[in-house]
């Protein structure tokens, strides 16, 4: 497969790097010092599953120089999806499909509005990874996993081809029977870890072990599950306890990317995580008061990071 990785950060760099290392034809869309390092020295990935280097790495900041590809792996922040969709038009041919591997539950619909739903998959991943330096990705924990599928959940040749490519690359991957339920199951986890983590500024091991914050985690998960069910997403009866089990299984030092962004004064995915729970619930009359409280507390910091207020 000819693959473009749009957004070569912790997610795109890791999964795109695994595919490239396994022999797939991968081009990385990046910019700045990261791009210069990729061109000069290749892509370095450090991982408990084995370090590797992709060298040479095909990298550019101009999608028009790449042209249509078979698949685009999207690894930007949730608030960058609409801008990314416009920028990736030169990568889209008649059979191209885009797989978003990012947080939130709205990426596929945003991509479909710009590119056409026939070009869009649902997708998600689990991993803790980040840019350690220009051209350098570090996988810090959590067993990497990807899931993806056609938006109507039908089996397809292109989905199977991507599954085979990830399997060949040594990445745990699957095509779930219901990609929308899978995306929301991930959202139960990430919106909870991100929101409570950003408020407490504590890692997973502390949040889950302090009784008061553990109860807060549980309440947030319950609200996200209630919003999902109000939106006709089919979750298992044990979705809340299963999500808490995932949080309990995290390395104790783990933090969420939204949490780290807020703590370090950067724009974050607040509106696509805690804010989305509130907004999507409100559309159907499903309240989410704990999530709304978290969103309201964090919003001034988000506005400051975006230069909209000063204090």
Image: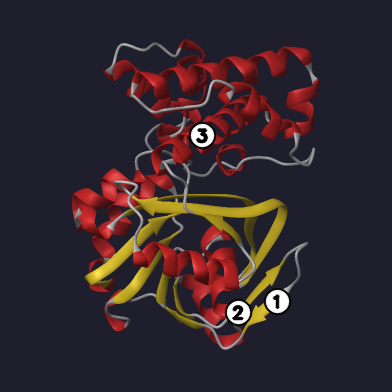
Q: Position of residue 121 (x, y in %)?
A: 34, 54
**Mark 3: secondary structure:** helix
209 or 62: nearer the viewer? 209
Alpha-carbon span between mark 1 and mark 2: 8 Å
Q: Which residue is mark 1?
A: 52
Residue at position x 69%, y 62% from top? 138
Q: Which residue is mark 3?
A: 185
**Mark 2: secondary structure:** helix
First in sequence, mark 3 or 1: give its number. 1
**Are the residues at dot 1 and dot 2 in contact (C-beta closer than 8 Å)?**
yes
291 or 295: nearer the viewer? 291
Q: Position of residue 116 (x, y in %)?
A: 19, 55
Residue 21 - label: 2
From the image, state whether disc 1 or disc 2 is nearer to you.
2
> Which image quadrant is residue 264 in?
top right
Alpha-carbon span between mark 3 and mark 1: 31 Å
Residue 36 - label: none
Q: Position of residue 81 (x, y in %)?
A: 34, 51
């Amino acid at each position: 497969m000819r693959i473009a990785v749009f957004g070569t950060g912790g997610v795109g760099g890791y999964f795109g790097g695994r595919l490239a290392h396994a022999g797939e034809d991968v081009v990385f869309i990046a910019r700045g010092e990261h791009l210069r390092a990729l061109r000069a020295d290749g892509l370095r990935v450090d991982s408990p599953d084995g370090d590797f280097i992709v060298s040479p790495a095909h990298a550019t900041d101009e999608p028009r120089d790449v042209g249509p590809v078979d698949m685009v792996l999207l690894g930007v922040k949730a608030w960058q999806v609409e801008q990314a969709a416009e920028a990736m038009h030169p990568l889209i041919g008649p059979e191209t499909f885009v797989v978003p591997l990012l947080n939130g539950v709205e990426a596929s619909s945003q991509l479909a509005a710009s590119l056409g739903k026939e070009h869009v998959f649902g997708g998600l991943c689990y991993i803790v990874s980040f840019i350690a330096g220009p051209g350098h990705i570090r996988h810090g924990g959590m067993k990497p996993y990807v899931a993806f599928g056609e938006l109507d959940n039908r089996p397809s040749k292109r989905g199977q081809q991507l599954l085979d490519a990830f399997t060949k690359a040594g990445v745990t991957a699957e095509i779930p029977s219901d990609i929308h339920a899978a995306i929301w199951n991930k959202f139960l986890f990430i919106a909870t870890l991100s929101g409570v983590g950003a408020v407490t500024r504590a890692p997973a091991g502390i949040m889950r072990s302090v009784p008061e914050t553990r109860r807060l985690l549980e309440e947030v998960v319950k609200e996200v599950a209630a919003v999902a069910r109000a939106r006709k997403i089919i979750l298992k009866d044990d979705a809340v306890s299963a999500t808490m089990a995932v949080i309990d299984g995290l390395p104790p030092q783990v933090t969420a990317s939204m949490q780290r962004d807020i703590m370090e004064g950067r724009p974050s995915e607040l509106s696509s995580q805690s804010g989305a729970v509130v907004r999507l619930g409100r559309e159907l009359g499903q309240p989410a008061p704990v999530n709304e409280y978290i969103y309201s507390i964090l919003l001034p910091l988000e506005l400051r990071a975006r230069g909209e207020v000063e204090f």
